[in-house]
Image (spheres, grey):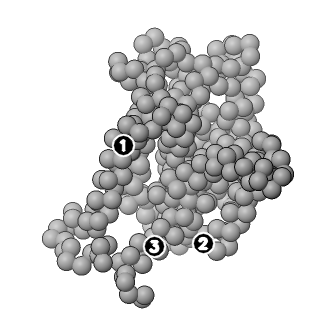
Amino acid sequence: MLYRENGQFKASYRADQQIFPIRQDRWAIGALLAVAFVVVPLLADEYMLRAIFVPFLILSLAALGLNVLVGYCGQISLGAGAFMAVGAYAAYNFMVRIEGMPMPVAMLLGGAFATLVGVVFGIPSLRIKGLYLAVATLAAQFFVDWAFLRIGWFTNYTPSGSVSVAELSFFGLPVVSPLQKYLFCLAVVCVFALLVKNLVRGHIGREWMAVRDMDVAASVIGIRPVYAKLTAFAVSSFIIGVAGALWAFVYLGSWEPAAFNINRSFDLLFMIIIGGLGSVMGSFFGAAFIVTLPIWLDQLLPALGAAVGIPIDTATVSHIVFMIFGALIVFFLIVEPHGLARLWSVGKEKLRLWPFPH
């Protein structure tokens, strides 16, 4: 009986339109933020911050951007890795070629440049959809990979094609240690998650969902599918571009075009399918699952193999991880298309009625 909304009356439209209208939800989010900003920095060691929490936050942001396009607007995209690469290399060139360029400004400009590229490659969505649109965005992935590999200007003419950034700072504050990188990424992700949550609850978000459900019916009631689709590509590409800049600057430090290949696009697509399409929370669930599952299996499978006398090497573990991802995608598409976020919502509904069964 702890999770109930009885007696929580709303006396204004503003109170009724809150992101978390139930008091217990607000408490839970406040506790989660307190754990993220206070408890994790105090208890987590450098390995956990560098290998788990930082990539989880950055990939959550990228999955959030892809979810705007695929989950809320219904436009299938296989080019998320390309937009991450555009954001990363654009931010790198802004920092290298403009003296004194602050890192946050360069990342936002990288996201803006990724927006332009996303809108250009989103133009085919005005005439095609479904599998054909997925192939068009896949072409964007291959084109961007070729451009950053073959055009030396993007990599500042480095012989190996690998680029790196110097020590990072946030308007004078250093972002060097794993703890500083974690807090910086956490702040960025919180801001973008709040912006996306408010965006999808507003007018533009309702247009995206109307186009996703039936674009013909949406156009009949006065919604412009051209505007809705292109804005979805723009917002999605901007968020993914910022995530790509974070991935390159904060997590990798030194990278090459192969860091944003087609596998990165598939990973992000797996995240939103497993986590839940059309859900902000699902992006975080999917990213947590994709990031932590290989780490757990790396520890668990060799131990199980040794217990039964079957040696399991690292390559076998990676293959098993792909098999598990594929099986889970098939499972969620058949059993629960809305992913882990839907299971979370069902659990909350059960808690509202507990201890009664119905």
Determine the residue positioned at 53% across, 73% down.
217
CA gap, disc 2 and disc 1: 33 Å
Q: Sort mark 2 into few (<14), some (14-19) or many (20+) by Cα contacts within 10 Å.
A: some
Q: Which residue corresponds to mark 1?
A: 39
Of label 1 and label 3, which has the lower sequence position? 1
In the shown orientation, is residue 177 left or right of residue 83?
A: left
Of label 2 and label 3, which has the lower sequence position? 2
- Secondary element at image label 2: loop
What kind of residue is marked 1? Answer: Val
In the shown orientation, is residue 219 left or right of residue 158?
A: left
Determine the residue positioned at 74% across, 16% down.
160
- Residue in the foreground of this view, choosing between 24 and 314: 314
Q: Which residue corresponds to mark 3?
A: 347
What kind of residue is marked 2? Answer: Glu
**Can residue 132 be seen in the rendering of this structure?**
no
Q: Which residue corresponds to mark 2?
A: 336
Of label 2 and label 1, which has the lower sequence position? 1
What kind of residue is marked 3? Answer: Gly
- Secondary element at image label 3: helix
Q: Residue furthest right?
A: 310
Where does residue 300 sit, x and y in percent of width and height? 68, 51
Q: Residue furthest left?
A: 11
Where does residue 126 sit, x and y in percent of width and height? 62, 55
